[in-house]
Image: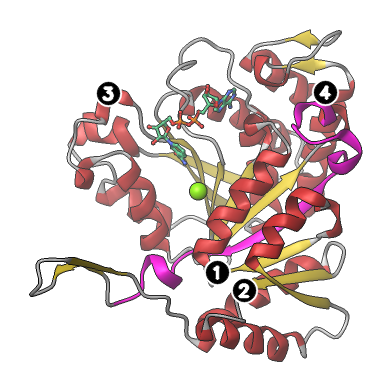
Amino acid sequence: MSKKILVVAGDGIGPEIVAEAMKVLQALQADGSIDVSIEDALIGGAAYDAVGDPLPAETLEAAKASDAVLLGAVGGPKWEPLHISKRPEKGLLGMRAGLGLFANLRPAILYPQLADASTLKADVVSGLDIMIVRELTGGIYFGQPRGVETLPSGERKGVNTLVYTESEVERICRVAFDIAMKRGKKVCSVDKANVLECTEMWREVAVKTAADYPEIDLSHMYVDNAAMQLVRAPKQFDVMVTTNMFGDILSDCAAMLTGSIGMLPSASLNADGQGMYEPIHGSAPDIAGKGVANPLATILSVAMMLRYSLDAPAAADRIEKAVSQVLDQGLRTADIMSEGMRQVGTAEMGDAVVAA
Ligand code: NAI
Ligand code: MG
């Protein structure tokens, strides 16, 4: 049955990199590997300029009616003077909330061909392939009570609250375990159970949920140690699962181990397997319109989309292999360029992936 994809290209380099991802989707469609229908809609600054709203109601409705959403990036200096409620980033947050995207999947992959892009020694990171599963709709970013109040003494008191229910922990652990079953079957649950009762419960729920996954090797780590281990010996990890805030921090750290922001995709999933897929980078206003942006993070986001929302794992594998192949051919966009390689622009890179 035909699956529906909504494409929201957004701002800055968004339209340029999404155009290359579309070429890849269309090539797979043309040779019969996938059966999809593709629509596009406005988001971010582009939507604000057109209709005065960074997430028009029809965009959210179209997203809800789709199996998956492919997002380029939103934001840029042009919209910075706007009130927070009208900023392009609001489009992204509105999409996450509107679709109930509670599971954020952030792979940190360092292709061996790019080992020298990392600030860490090649033997520590070359071939790194870990998946961080971050809870996205709960935890301290959403917990009540919250805010800043002024005490009778005149001193101010700031409050944020870490809250998780057992069912929220269980569902994110299941996402992590399901993913691990298709990879190395190893999950490290990251918490601060020695200090925070809420995450002590998190650990208990993780253990209880793992009983349904006898093949999974579940370990636990305190977040401070996890940060150290990510930098010391990241290849010890397969899948990591953690809270919203710990995941925010650890996933950025893991991403930077690879040194290449233009290479990393991400996925955000809801309970129905619907997902939004996007590169981890932003709209890169400094290089927008120049045709030099790296489209591979967006192309790899399409691979994640095919794997996690469109039930087309073979097509996903083909995309990932094609990306590896163009790197083997020595093709590099400026952000991953190194000596002896051939520098190409956005469109040439997209064409090379299609050819591969
Ligand atoms: P950024 O990720 O857009 O750019 C950081 C640096 O990485 C820049 O030097 C940029 O040129 C480079 N870069 C990013 N993607 C690249 C690619 N595909 N190929 C080559 N180089 C690339 O982050 P920045 O500069 O902090 O934010 C710019 C705008 O993007 C802001 O308005 C920000 O709010 C927005 N943003 C949007 C996100 C999203 O849509 N998910 C995420 C992060 C930022
Ligand atoms: Mg972050």
Number of other residues with Cα within 10 Å of mark 3, as a class: few under 14, some 14 to 19, many 20 or more = few
Q: Which sits earlier in the primary sequence, circle 2 or circle 4?
A: 2
Give the image location of residue 94, x and y in percent: 33, 54
| Kind of residue indicated by mark 1 | Thr
Q: Do the residues labelled 2 and 1 touch (CB within 8 Å)?
A: yes
Residue 307 sits above or below residue 91 on the image: below
Ligand 1 under 8 Å from disc 4 Cβ: no
For the N terminus, give its image quadrant: bottom right
Q: Do the residues labelled 3 and 2 touch (CB within 8 Å)?
A: no
Secondary structure, mark 1, is loop
Q: Mark 1 points at which residue?
A: 243
Secondary structure, mark 2, is strand
Numbered disc in front, either 2 or 4: 2
Find the magenta span and give its range.
115-144
Q: Name the residue under label 2.
A: 191
Residue 20 sits above or below residue 173 on the image: above
Instruction: Kindly report the distance in space between the C-alpha atoms of the residues bearing marks 4 and 1.
Output: 36 Å
